[in-house]
């Protein structure tokens, strides 16, 4: 039976590596997901930003996160808005939480996509769907309760199980229901993090990868895909969730990530 181990190597972002199309995306997601020093505009850590009387403030959470591809990520979320900053990338999700807007602020480009369609291309599994169907099945198992600061989390493990072979780990993730975010927002963030829906708001995602030691012993390396290190209650002015203006639409994420606007 294969051993489960940890590996210091890292893989792709929180909110996505769209391997089937050769496209790398942050992950929603989540995952979602991650750069040099991303920052939330007009917010101080742990403090409510001052704003003019004509700008409404909404209570929400500011999250300090890590993504394997982009590094530090700042995520801002309320019951009506989601924004994630990673270097020049900005991700916005708004009601009814069916579509996502991804901006490249450097090239002044934007890509809009249906979340469900985009989520189908995000796959963190070490085994491909055809391999799973041919040799076994997949299940999500609740493991234990956990917490991050005062926020309750639940840990889940996605496993591949087979009739005549040992069960193999695939993904490990933590979600929370402590904040009353809309179910549709939870669903959107799970899809953009490459996770099954219906388990709450994703805070952590780890991937297991099948590896072999130099002596031929098989084991599973543990890769950090998304990690939330700090959650800060915050009042956000509506301007926080204003999308960048004057950006040119592009046809796909590859064009957005290349950063040349297709020119």
Image (tube, rainbow, N blue to C red):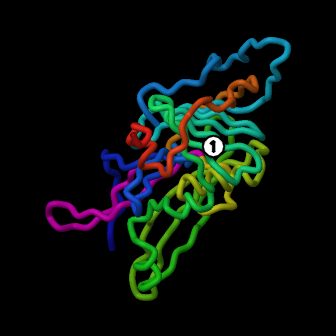
Residue 94 in the image: x percent, y percent? Answer: 71, 43
Q: Residue at x 59, y 52 (%)?
A: 113
Question: Which residue, as the protein is rendered here, is positioned at the far front?
Answer: 263
Q: Residue at x 74, y 32 (%)?
A: 60
**Residue 172 vertical placement versus 163 (above, below):** above
Depth order, front residue of 192/151:
192
Q: Quadrant of the N terminus?
A: bottom left
Question: Which residue, as the protein is rendered here, is positioned at the far left?
Answer: 215
In the image: residue 118, left or right of residue 94: left
**Residue 238 vertical placement versus 249 (above, below):** above
Disc 1: which residue: 147
Q: Quadrant of the C terminus?
A: top left
Predominant SS along the magenta part: strand
**Residue 229 vertical placement versus 208 (above, below):** above
Classify residue 245 by image quadrant.
Answer: top right
Depth order, front residue of 117/82:
117
Q: Residue at x 60, y 43 (%)?
A: 101
Residue 194 in the image: x percent, y percent? Answer: 53, 58
In the image: residue 178, left or right of residue 210: right
* Residue numbers of the magenta segment: 203-224
Disc 1 crowd, CA 10 A, few/some/many (<14, 14-19, 20+): few
| Magenta stretch contains residue 211 | yes
Classify mark 1: helix, strand or loop: strand
| Magenta stretch contains residue 106 | no
Residue 247 in the image: x percent, y percent? Answer: 56, 34
Q: Tell me if I can see residue 167 in this picture.
A: yes
Residue 120 in the image: x percent, y percent? Answer: 54, 64
Q: Residue at x 79, y 28 (%)?
A: 58
């Amino acid at each position: 039976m294969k051993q489960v181990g940890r590996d210091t190597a890292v893989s792709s972002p929180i909110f996505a590596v769209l391997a089937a199309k050769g496209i790398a995306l942050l992950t929603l997601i989540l995952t979602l997901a991650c750069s040099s020093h991303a920052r939330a505009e007009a917010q101080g850590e742990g403090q409510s930003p001052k704003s003019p009387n004509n700008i409404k403030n909404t209570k929400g959470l500011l999250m300090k996160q890590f993504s394997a591809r982009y590094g530090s990520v700042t995520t801002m979320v309320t019951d009506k808005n989601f924004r994630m900053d990673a270097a020049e990338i900005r991700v916005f999700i708004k009601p009814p939480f069916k579509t996502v807007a991804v901006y490249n602020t450097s090239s002044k480009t934007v890509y809009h996509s249906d979340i469900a369609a985009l989520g189908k291309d995000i796959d963190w599994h070490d085994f491909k769907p055809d391999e799973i169907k041919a040799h076994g099945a997949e299940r999500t198992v609740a493991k234990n309760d956990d917490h991050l600061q005062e926020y309750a989390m639940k840990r889940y493990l996605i496993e591949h199980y087979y009739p005549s072979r040992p069960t193999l780990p695939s993904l490990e993730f933590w979600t929370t229901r402590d904040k009353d975010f809309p179910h549709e927002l939870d669903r959107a963030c799970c899809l953009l993090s490459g996770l099954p829906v219906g388990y709450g708001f994703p805070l952590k995602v780890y991937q297991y990868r099948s590896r072999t030691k130099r002596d031929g012993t098989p084991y599973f390396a543990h890769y950090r895909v998304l990690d939330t290190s700090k959650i800060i209650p915050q009042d956000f002015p509506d301007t926080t969730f204003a999308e960048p203006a004057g950006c040119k639409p592009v046809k796909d994420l590859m064009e957005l990530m290349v950063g040349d606007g297709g020119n």
